[in-house]
Amino acid sequence: MNRRRRGFSLIECVIAIALIGSSIIAGLELMEAQATQEYDTVNGLRAETILGRELELVRSSTMSTLTSSGYSADARHPEFDVRKTVQAVDANTREVQIHVRWTNSRGTVSTRSVVTFRCEAAP
């Protein structure tokens, strides 16, 4: 008696489920890696924006108002730590170092920094 079998065997179903499951897991890991990369990129851009804002404040300040400071960037992004160091080079020149630090998604500290000089003409 010759019987025709229809459908899939148990082994074929198990292999198909394993392939589909591994494909779904790989896709989820890829999405997580992409989200992490995007988070780090956005924070890098925020740090650059904070540096730009601080540089503009230095440029618009008078020599007498330039002081060293440290603070959290703002209430919306408390993870950014901003440090500004002002040192006198001579009577008319100040060196200003600005550092923005934050902890990235991998748990390591990232930093963006800029150094500039502020000069005033001699009286």
Image: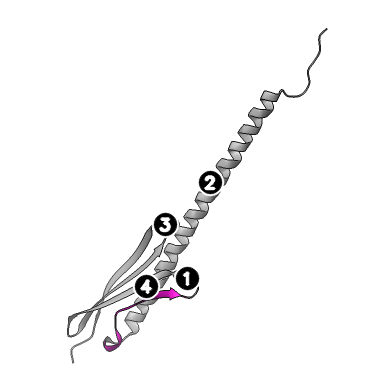
Part of the protein shown in magenta: 64-74
**1 lies above or below 51:** above
| Residue 12 in the figure: left or right of residue 47 | right
Q: Is residue 71 magenta?
A: yes
Q: Earlier in the sequence, mark 4 or mark 3?
A: 4
Asked whether disc 4 touches disc 3, contact meaning CB atoms under 8 Å apart, the reply is no
Q: Looking at the picture, does residue 106 appear above or below residue 6?
A: below
* Quadrant including the C terminus: bottom left
* Contact, mark 1 vs mark 3 (Cβ under 8 Å): no
Closest to the camera, between mark 1 and mark 3, is 3
Q: Which residue was labeled with disc 1?
A: 77
| Mark 1 vs mark 2, CA separation in Å | 27 Å
Q: Which residue is mark 4?
A: 82
Up the image or down, 36 lies above or below 91; here it is above
Please give left or right for residue 21 compared with residue 110 in the image: right
Task: Classify mark 4: residues with Cα within 10 Å, few (<14), some (14-19) or many (20+).
Answer: many
Q: Quadrant of residue 83?
A: bottom left
Q: Position of residue 13 (x, y in %)?
A: 69, 28
Residue 79, given in percent of the width and then of the height, sits at: 44, 68
Q: From the image, state whether disc 4 or disc 3 is nearer to you.
A: 3
* Numbered label attached to residue 6: none
Three-letter code for the amino acid on which mark 2 is drawn: Leu
Disc 4 + disc 1, Cβ < 8 Å: no
The percent position of residue 72, horizontal first and vertical second, equals: 41, 74
Give the residue number, with chain letter if any, for mark 3.
107
Pick whichever of labels 4 and 1 is earlier in the sequence: 1
Identify which amino acid the numbered label 3 is placed on. Answer: Gly
